[in-house]
Amino acid sequence: MKIDGVFSGGGVKAFVFIGALQALEEKNITIGKVAGTSAGALFATLVAAGYQSKELKEIFLNVNIDQFLDQSQISSAIPFLKWLTLYKTMGLYRGKYFENWLQSCLEKKGVKYFSDMNADQLKIVAADITFNRVVVFPDDLMRFYHIDASYFPIAKAVRSSISIPYFFRPCQITNPFSGQKSLIVDGMILSSFPLWLFEERSDADYRPVLGMQLTDPNQYYYNKKIKNAIDLLKATIGTMRKAHDTRYISKQTAEQILFFPVEEISSTDFSINRKEKESLIIYGYQRTKHFLGEWKYI
């Protein structure tokens, strides 16, 4: 059975996706088209490149993700300088190590550019904070930036999508005709869960969509109690991050979403140890097996 898949953002919590993919493989369910934001974009990309759960488990259990927090040489030597330079760099970490690492992983599968994949096989969501818009790679590269998507590195698109503001430095895209520069950051600030990318499809393209979301389902229905200015600020930020996605979530589409409410681990805990990684993978596997046992599309 073939389905389409959507992976949400959620930082290191995304280790649960490895277990989820294992459970899908055991049911002989394969993913055709795939989309994702932030950490979800990373796993969507690796799935689209042809990685299986066994390979992903081997890779992520052994990789030290602390290495993704790369600094300049001078900041590494004098740690407090990264805070002094934050005003200009707009991010504590460069993200270059991550981009090079991902490119190496993709090249092992013979993939580097979007042209190395089937058309519409992979969609990566980010946010252009210069022009206040959601960006979908590769679709919007020509429309917004006059860049040929065929030869745009997939690793750069994913690096753009994981650019957590102030944590990783924003990526930059320059329009070759106008010279206009755009700063691209983590897609989670506008669309953490891009289920909407599969909303309109022809009958010929139709197949079940499985969304994998790293939060509790109540986030879409919870009535917040706003009693003071702090509550107002939190609610405002939360609405900014979730309203776009919530518009496309209904009781019907919620049946197509596999929720992983991981609360005990922070999204940016890059010091996560092997035992914690394994625990997340097992949790993803068990929750997915239970979900598939009741999923009406099987």
Image (cartoon, rainbow, N blue to C red):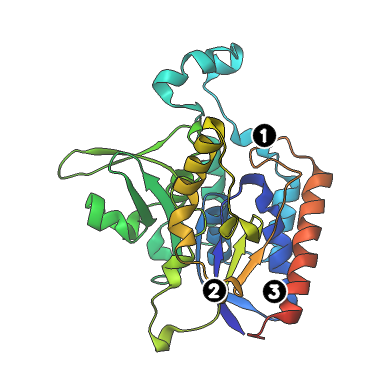
How far across and how far down the image is residue 114, in percent? 40, 61
Closer to viewer: mark 2 or mark 1: 2
* In front of the other: 179 or 130: 130
Circle 1 residues within 10 Å: few <14, some 14–19, many ≥20: few
Q: Secondary structure at mark 2?
A: helix
Report which quarter residue 23 is drawn in: bottom right
Please give the residue where the numbered disc 3 appears in the rendered image.
Answer: 24
Say whether residue 27 is left or right of residue 83: right
Q: Secondary structure at mark 1?
A: helix
How far across and how far down the image is residue 63, in percent? 70, 44
Amino acid on which disc 2 is placed: Thr
Q: Is residue 4 visible?
A: no
Residue shown at the point (64%, 38%) measured from the top left: 268
Residue shown at the point (56%, 78%) measured from the top left: 3
Q: CA distance from mark 1 to mark 3?
A: 29 Å
Please give the residue where the numbered disc 1 appears in the rendered image.
Answer: 66
Q: Is residue 209 above or below residue 245?
A: below
The N terminus lies in quadrant: bottom right
Q: Are marks 1 and 3 in contact (CB under 8 Å)?
A: no
User: Of label 2 and label 1, which has the lower sequence position?
Assistant: 1
